[in-house]
Image (tube, rainbow, N blue to C red):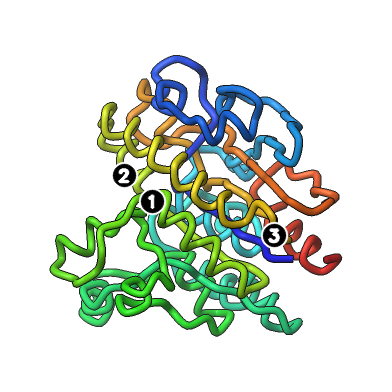
Amino acid sequence: MHFIMIFLDGFGLGSEENNPIVSARTPNMDQLLGGHLLWGDRFIAAGKSRLTSLDATLGVPGVPQSATGQTTLWTGVNASKVLGYHLNAYPNQQLAHIIAEKSIFKQLADRGQQGMFANTFTPFYEQQIANGKKRHSASTLSALAGGVKLRRIPDLREGRAVYYDMTNAFPRELGEDVPLISPEQAGRNLGKLALNYDFTLYESFLTDVFGHKQKWAESIRLIEQIDSFLGGLMDTVKDEDVAWLLTSDHGNIEDFEIKGHTQNRVPALTWSNSKIEWPQWTKLEDVTPGILEILSIK
């Protein structure tokens, strides 16, 4: 069994109104769900796919934020309850300690299973880290806690990594010698990579960026790229012993009436080519224990 987690920052389940996810053309997701249905608080079981919704508020007053939401997703520990509040952006020292002890990558490594973080790290990023201008996100800290080797430009050039923009347009703007590819090809690359590992994580935070900037046309285009990315992934894994989950840490891009994060529930969109007893996921802290259970059984 190979498990892939696709993480989209700031991707919630909103209403039909002011929602670029609803306005976008998403034939691949529509086929998975049996309709244009990636919105609202609903449960769908359609063939090998399933959609449930997760509470992202973590039982703490206020608007959910990235550092606590992501720490919770990749450890199973309710980070907002530990701190007593929602923390934005990057984990503080207390959350970094939780990640170091409970990261899904570490838990897998401790029992002899191999995880992979598919995203690409550029020399520019590494320079910013070294200069103290940037800090590692919860995803990167989680991978490092499990001894995962970070992927770099040579990996991206050879199709052994995926960039967060899916097409490699951003690293090319930084002057990196990498090919411009389609979202479909990026999805195929991710699928091929994942077949070598027990657990693979891929993240894109553009959904949160575009939600904050309230770029309607660009957001629709991004959602359509994500849909094409999923189509490429499915082309590669449809006949393999693979399960995948698409989820998020909090809402944002799904509601243009609110400039910023929302308290909307987030999707747990799943698919598997194998018979899986999917966990009863209802909140963010259920995700890591559920994935570990699936990989333990399989």
CA gap, disc 2 and disc 3: 33 Å
Would you say the residues marked 2 and 1 are in contact, meaning their CB atoms lie under 8 Å apart? yes
Occupied quadrant, residue 240: bottom right
The amino acid sitting under disc 3 is Glu
Residue, disc 3? 240
User: Looking at numbered disc 1 in the image, what kind of residue is underneath it?
Assistant: Phe
> Residue at the location (55% across, 79% down)?
145
Give the x, y percent position of residue 150.
43, 78
What residue is pinned by disc 2?
A: 209
User: Quick one: 217 or 210, which is closer to the camera?
Assistant: 217
Q: CA distance from mark 3 to mark 1?
A: 28 Å
Amino acid marked by disc 2: Val
Looking at this view, is 109 or 212 the one in front?
109
Q: How many badges with numbers are in the image?
A: 3
Q: Which residue is mark 1?
A: 205
Q: Residue at x 57, y 46 (%)?
A: 247
Instruction: Identify the residue at image location x=64%, y=38%.
Output: 55
Q: Is residue 211 above or below residue 244?
A: above
Assign a secondary structure to mark 2.
helix
Q: CA distance from mark 2 to mark 1?
A: 6 Å
From the viewer's perspective, tell me whether residue 27 is left or right of residue 1: left
Q: Position of residue 78 (x, y in %)?
A: 64, 55
Q: Earlier in the sequence, mark 3 or mark 1?
A: 1
Give the residue at x 72% y 50%: 272
Rendered view: 267 above or below 149: above
Viewer-nearest of discs 2 and 3: 3
Say what secondary structure mark 1 lies in. loop
